[in-house]
Image (cartoon, rainbow, N blue to C red):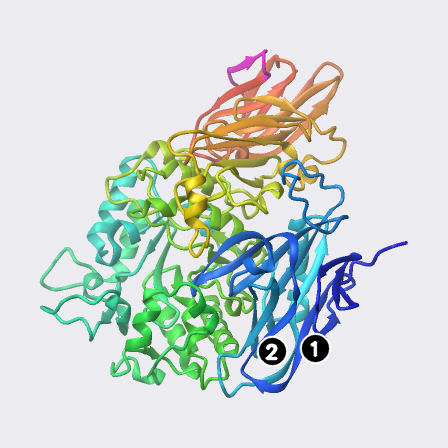
Amino acid sequence: MTIKATPVIKDGCLMVRGKVVLTRVPQNILVSPASNDSAFFGATDPTPSSRHVFKLGVLEKYRFLCLFRFKIWWMIPRVGKSGSEIPMETQMLLLEATEESALNDEVNSSEASTDNTFYVLFLPVLDGLFRTSLQGTSANELHFCVESGDASVQTSQALEAVFVNSGENPFELIKNSVKILEQHKGTFCHIENKKIPVHLDWFGWCTWDAFYTQVDPQGIKEGLQSFLEGGCSPKFLIIDDGWQDTVNEFSKEGEPPIEGIQFATRLVDIRENTKFRSSGLDEDRTNLHEFIDTIKEKYGLKFVYVWHALAGYWGGVLPTSDSMKKYNPKLVYPTQSPGNLGNMRDIVMVILEKYGVGFIDPSKIYDFYNDLHSYLASNGVDGVKVDVQDLIETLGSGYGGRVILTRQYQEALEKSVSRNFKENNLICSMSHNSDSIYSSKRSAVARASEDFMPREPTFQTLHIASVAFNSLLLGEIFVPDWDMFQSTHVTAEFHGAARALGGCAVYVSDKPGVHDFKILKRLVLPDGSILRARHAGRPTRDCLFVDPVMDAKSLLKIWNSNKLTGVIGVFNCQGEGRWPMEQEAEEIALAVPSGPSPLSGHVSPIDVEFLDDIAGEDWNGNCAVYGSLSMLPKKGILEVSLTTLKYEIYTICPIKVFGQNLHFSPIGLLDMYNSGGAVEAVNCIIDVSSCTIKVNGRGCGRFGSYSSTKPTLCRVDMEEEEFTYNDKNGLLTVKLEGMGNLREIEFIY
């Protein structure tokens, strides 16, 4: 008998693939099909309201992973086993199910067979003017909350509030689900249907942690000069917060400072502040256009982005400013949802709730963005990083609610960026609410976690883990942005390695003259390009339901793929940080071994999803695994042991058989973090007397391959080249010179 995958309610239970997922489902819960195998769940209430909390059922004994907003701007992951552990503001819930349907506590995740495992995905989505989130109760009930954010926007029913789907591969399940929602809802686009900004493939520098708001042209020039002198010049620059013309009416000179009062600052004019304007009194000071032209020409910059907030600045715009009056601004006060208030309060919102936001009339918001962006473009700016986006959800009262207001702002922003900048040059930030996520039609890059904070030693492991887990959802709609880091930070290698396999932009925020070029040159080729992996870096399947930060035993493994290789990064994130709002934080932290005691785990080629697609036809499953070169079958394992804040990267290279039993696989640039990103293509030419392997590779340095036998000759771009061959492990190495352009490497056997 064939069991249908479509979720149904039967005898008061939510059934998926014949298994009970939720019990005690109320009678007011409604089900409607979304596709052949998926469905929407909704509910009715006799009393109209702008906010409903509906019980969906009781969730017990399933291992789960959820992504929730611990504060208004950002999501983090949480794992657990029952509904009581699911926080407010959960925006994705993934369950692991087996034929037995319930959790067996004796079975370790890494040892459990995947043959009878499937996954159930819950995505709370947008339903008309309402936005949905999930939350649990102490009775293990799973609730969904629908809210409009405007007391006058009410409903008595939510018919398509929670999307439920299932599948045997969790990554395909999430991808397919997002694509179903894309087609059904029509309010956003999957990442495959967006234009990807070109800056992602080039090394960058952001001014934030180098200067904070004290950024000025001289400091930027000094930083670019020091990169140039070190032989590793950025090709894109983000001039972060500090360039705009702003005023703070509440910070009085001589009075004691108020914590967070800087967030009440408002925008006065779309033009740059005096630091970036020419002055007749200072011959060295140029205007913004001249400054950008100069640094592009002198330092080889391809892209210059500048920062601004979605509302103009942190506190919006100054309503009394002559330059702003045409946008009909007025002072409004944010109202946060109970979900946000029930999690972690943020100082930004505390300040804005007290001092208000200079809010631009939604009917004028496109005019504001277009004026700002056309002015910036006329001065040589190529794109924008737009921050503080989730603020808009708190301003929906009187404007039709949070969903429609967010969409108005998002559409206006994307329209202006499309009109004024090439290549869809937009980076979204502080935008993790589902209002923004499911209203993104063009935005293709979004920050995937809270900031890299160099002064916060306990945040570093959380940063890596949260980006990897958040990318499960965000990576289907955006290219996740891992944020900047500093190359001389004590955790620089940890961060650099993660970004190398994140499939993301690679950019730093070094202070002028303070660089570690050894680390940077493992990320960046001499021409300024990077070896960016093809997808969003995400946790491996056996890491999805464990806590790599606080369970004192689990390593974090992140997988990705290149054109012809896979890549796995293993990170020890234990013992250095604690998740916010984790109830058992102190008890769990005490279990983490103190000192440099290592944790052990294993890696396997099977950790790389869709490796068969990379390997192509006639692959027998064998791989060359480069950390230190070894051969493994597809399901073979390699033991790894790491102390806290240490990592290993393994390049997984499917071995193909050519000619008369020649086993060969290109590895890539051996001294780069993502070695396999340098391999573009491989093919074989066989004639009567010889077999020639042709590899197209990028970059310079030691280019390695696995070969079962030693070639007789090597050529690079038709010129004979010396090579080395290790007959013990089959490592074949040739030295590539040059800047980073494409090379043709031939091995003749």
Q: Is residue 722 magenta?
A: yes
Dot 2 surroundings within 10 Å: few (below 14), some, or many (20 or more)? some
Q: Is residue 404 above or below residue 518?
A: below
In x, y percent, where is residue 210? Answer: 26, 49
Q: Is residue 332 above or below residue 712?
A: below
Left or right, 669 with reference to 236: right
Rendered image quadrant of residue 461: top left
- Give the residue displayed 45% in from the left and 28% down from the top: 671
Give residue 128's mark. Answer: 2
**In which quadrant will I find the N terminus?**
bottom right
In x, y percent, where is residue 194? Answer: 57, 60
Q: Is residue 30 above or below residue 386?
A: below
Label 2: element kind: loop
Residue 225 visible in this rendered orientation of the protein: yes
**Disc 1 marks which amino acid?**
Asn
Mark pair 2, 1: CA separation: 19 Å
Give residue 28's mark. Answer: 1
Q: Are marks 2 and 1 in contact (CB under 8 Å)?
A: no
Q: Is residue 243 magenta?
A: no
Residue 421 visible in this rendered orientation of the protein: no
**Which range of residues does the magenta coloring cover?**
721-730
Which residue occupies the foreground of this view, 517 or 591?
Answer: 591
**In which quadrant will I find the C terminus?**
top right
Label 1: element kind: loop
Rendered image quadrant of residue 180: bottom right
